[in-house]
Image (tube, rainbow, N blue to C red):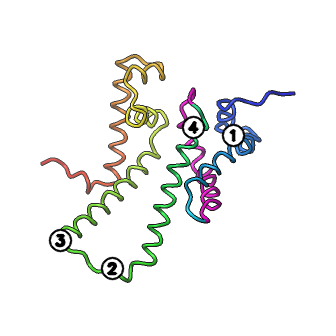
């Protein structure tokens, strides 16, 4: 009888597109994912969120699994991913409900309230632009930036992970950040006026 693959092997198979890997991943982790959703979902949303979670996972080509740091617990990581997804799902649902139900009752805002709404709108636009720019970066650039900003790894740890010297890492990091900023500025020049 063949031994069950480890989580690392299973995730690698999913990312390579090995036949049957997605189904095996689902069999192994769907109960945990559903339990995490159920613990955080409101009312009857659990089933909808569960379906939406797997749809997004597939639509994004298992990006969440690509970001999993090998050597850490996959169930613990999945619980964090699910928690964030549930939060985003509820935010999106509230925003849709407010857009549909509340638009006729809104009065024009003025003064500080209007400025706050405008700033919030600009931040939302800039976030969307940032996500679009992120999507076109090469995988190595995304990994460098993610290791530095989101995982808060120091240069030595990042260099070791990528097999780079300290100098090569500084160059690669600088170029990755520059390419990202170029993509953001290209998409939103109005947010980055040229220095006089």
> Comparing marks 2 and 4, which lies closer to the viewer?
4
Q: Is residue 91 above or below residue 30?
A: below
Residue 22: image quadrant is top right
| Residue 111 circle label | 3
User: Which residue is at 74% across, 44% downward?
Assistant: 27
- Residue ID for mark 2: 106
Relative depth, front residue between 8 and 17: 8
Q: For the residue labelled by badge 3, is the local secondary structure a helix, a strand or a loop?
A: helix
Q: Is 177 left, or right, of 44 in this rendering?
A: left
Relative depth, front residue between 97 and 170: 97
Q: Is residue 3 above or below residue 192?
A: above
Q: Is residue 166 magenta?
A: no
Q: Earlier in the sequence, mark 2 or mark 4?
A: 4
- Residue ID for mark 1: 17
User: Which residue is at 67% across, 32% downward?
Assistant: 7
Q: For the residue labelled by badge 2, is the local secondary structure a helix, a strand or a loop?
A: loop
Q: Earlier in the sequence, mark 2 or mark 3?
A: 2
Mark 3 vs mark 1, CA separation in Å: 54 Å
The 10 Å Cα crowd at callout 1, few under 14, some 14 to 19, many 20 or more, is few
Relative depth, front residue between 73 and 185: 73
| Residue 139 circle label | none
Residue 89 in the image: state x and y as whole percent. 51, 59
- Residue furthest to the right in view is 1
Mark 2 vs mark 3, CA separation in Å: 16 Å
């Amino acid at each position: 009888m063949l031994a069950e693959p480890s989580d690392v092997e299973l995730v690698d198979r999913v990312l390579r597109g090995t036949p049957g890997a997605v189904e095996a991943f689902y069999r192994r982790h769907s109960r945990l994912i559903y339990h995490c959703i159920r613990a955080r979902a409101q009312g009857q949303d659990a089933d909808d969120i569960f379906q939406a979670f797997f749809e997004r996972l597939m639509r994004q080509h298992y990006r969440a699994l690509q970001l999993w740091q090998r050597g850490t617990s996959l169930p613990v990581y999945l619980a964090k991913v699910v928690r964030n997804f549930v939060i985003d799902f509820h935010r999106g649902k509230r925003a849709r409900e407010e857009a549909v139900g509340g638009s006729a009752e809104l009065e024009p805002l003025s003064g500080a309230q209007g400025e706050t709404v405008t700033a919030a709108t600009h931040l939302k636009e800039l976030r969307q632009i940032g996500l679009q720019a992120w999507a076109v970066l090469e995988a190595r650039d995304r990994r460098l930036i993610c290791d530095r900003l989101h995982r808060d790894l120091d240069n030595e740890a990042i260099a070791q992970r990528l097999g780079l010297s300290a100098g090569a890492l500084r160059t690669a990091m600088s170029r990755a950040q520059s390419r990202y900023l170029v993509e953001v500025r290209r998409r939103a020049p109005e947010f980055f006026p040229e220095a006089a």
